[in-house]
Amino acid sequence: MRLITLLSLLFIFNANIWGQNKDLKKANQLFKEDKYALAIPHYKKALTTKKNLSIKSKLAFCYKITNQIEAAVKLYEEIVTNERAKIKSFYYYAETLMSSGRYDEAKSWFSKYAIIETEDENVDRMIASCDFAKSVPAYFGHAVITSFSQNSEVDENAPVFWDNGIVFTSDRKGKLKFLDTKSGATDRSYLRLYHSEQLPDGTYSQPKEYISKINDARKNTGMATFQPSGASMFFTRNGNHLNKQNAYCLQLYEAKSSNGETWEKAEQLHFCRTASNYMHPAISADGKSLFFVSDKAGGLGGTDIYVSKKEKDRWSKPQNLGPKINTDGHEGFPFMHQNGKLYFCSKGHLGLGGFDIFVTQLDENGEWETPTNLGAPINSPTDDISIFISENEEKGLFTSSREGGDDDIFLVSFIPQAAAITSTVIAPSIKEETKTAPPTKVAATRPFNQPIPEEKIPEFEENEVAIIKEEKVVERKVFLEQFSTPQIDIEQNKVYTIPSIQFFEGEYFVTYKIAKELDQLAILLKEHPTLRIEIAAHTANLSSFEEKMKLTQNRADAMLDYLKRKGIDENRVQVKGYGGQQPLNNCLMDIDCSVEEHATNDRVEIKVIKK
């Protein structure tokens, strides 16, 4: 009897081992095929009987790559304490911490990784991003953000205003369940185009599949862009031919219409190749430039942004937008506004975590300017990808995974800067008071397209004060700390030192605090249209002549770029980096000075050239 019991237990034990091995084998095969969502449940089952470090590491990576950040952080916390953990786990753990907004912890783990992996050039950028994320200024300083009411529990992305509503991409379940096949990569329905109509009350209707002949039940279809005339739409869809990796790569298609409603059969663009992915199309307003993303050979990184020009009836050979925009990381989801500004997302520029959205434009020489991070509230520690802004720049749409890991659509109303600086609204008669609030996103639950009610007093930022008077008028005023008192007697050739403009050591990006000071300077210049100034950047004598000159010139140029975005004519502002040539004390390179004495020379000065 004892023998029978022993044999039974042995059978059960062997069955469990066999089941675990089966799950692990299946999970590893799915992992190898980049089918991370499908691999997760098999790795979780395998972990129930064997706490293997390799299994944990692969499961954590699956969580990370599928945006299940909380689960990834929890598992990596265990992994990195194991002395046998691979050093790359430190980097992945830091990435997930960054995506959770835990920047100081992320910086610590990136730094630990950098000590060992000295050849990884990316880690320096990630460490810099941890500092940058805490101080990046808001490109759109006054924005009201609302979650799209038709978001689902799966992904929604690439929204555009079109056809009296919003056209977007989603992998939600299709209407015909028996035709609804799943993607192996996500274990969800294939991506399709949907349309949600805007109703008279400003809300949005239940989405319906958009253009049935465009969507394909067994292929990913989405990321549509439309010519304003409605003559053409471009979109992404899996191709018809397998590549060498036995996969159907994403390709670009064009569908034409004579009335903007009935669409002809879509044709694949001739420059697409089956060996690579071509995706995220964005057509310019004049229909002459088509921007898109590809991982084709010859690029600068994982995925790059390209442009093709319309030459008669044919699209030209695509051109890479170059290193100012493309990095050794991933860029995606371009959007070209009517005003010539190009928006896109990237993981390769300094950011807040995950993908961030950036903006750039061509300068007078036809070269792309250094991209600017949009900052909060558009960007967040998680992935923020596609953006679309209306022609009048009063409203927009963007995609973010900030609410739970899946991609969701957010609606944004942009408050004009003039209204944000000085506005008058009716308010109840109450005593004079001062109200301040940190620069966080404004939560809004009202319909997106409705204006802010007059009785609603918007939140104020750090340097703004609301003075509520007995005559029921609320005036918002911005105090100009350096010029509020002397602005009536500005002296020509006088130099003003702005002690509140302090750059991080060795850096030249415009932080939130610096941006607020430059906002005040922009107001002053607008109030005095004949005023011309020079912005001079100085630094301490703690590095070589060339390094100091380059750093201060970069700082001066960065401040000018910011003022230009605020509507200031660059001809009114001269900028110059002086390095350490004009110290305020005797702290030269060969002089022994304290840190405080050297710091005195790190400053920004403004000289009045013309009143």
Image (tube, rainbow, N blue to C red):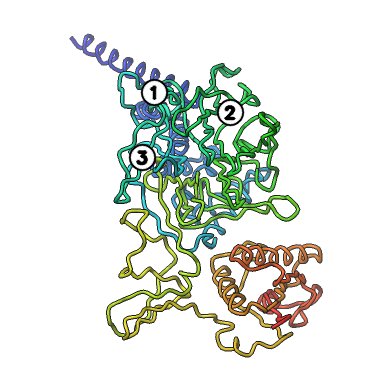
Q: CA distance from mark 2 to mark 3?
A: 28 Å
Kind of residue indicated by mark 1: Lys
Res 171 quadrant in image: top left
Kind of residue indicated by mark 3: Ser
The residue that mark 3 highlights is 196
Q: Which mark is residue 182?
A: 1
Q: Could you say where residue 146 lies in the image, as x and y percent from the top left?
A: 37, 53
Q: Residue furthest front?
A: 259
The residue closer to the viewer here, 66 or 592, is 66
Residue at disc 3, secondary structure:
strand
The residue closer to the viewer here, 231 or 308, is 231
Q: CA distance from mark 2 to mark 1?
A: 20 Å
Q: Taking the image as drawn, is residue 445 in sight?
A: yes
Q: Which mark is residue 277?
A: 2
Q: Nearer the viewer, mark 2 or mark 3?
A: 3
The residue closer to the viewer here, 377 or 114, is 377
Q: Answer whether labels 1 and 3 touch (C-beta < 8 Å).
A: no
Kind of residue indicated by mark 2: Asn
Task: Judge left or right: residue 224 versus residue 113.
Answer: left
Q: CA distance from mark 1 to mark 3?
A: 23 Å
Residue at disc 1, secondary structure:
strand
- Identify the residue at horizontal 77%, vertical 71% (top origin): 578
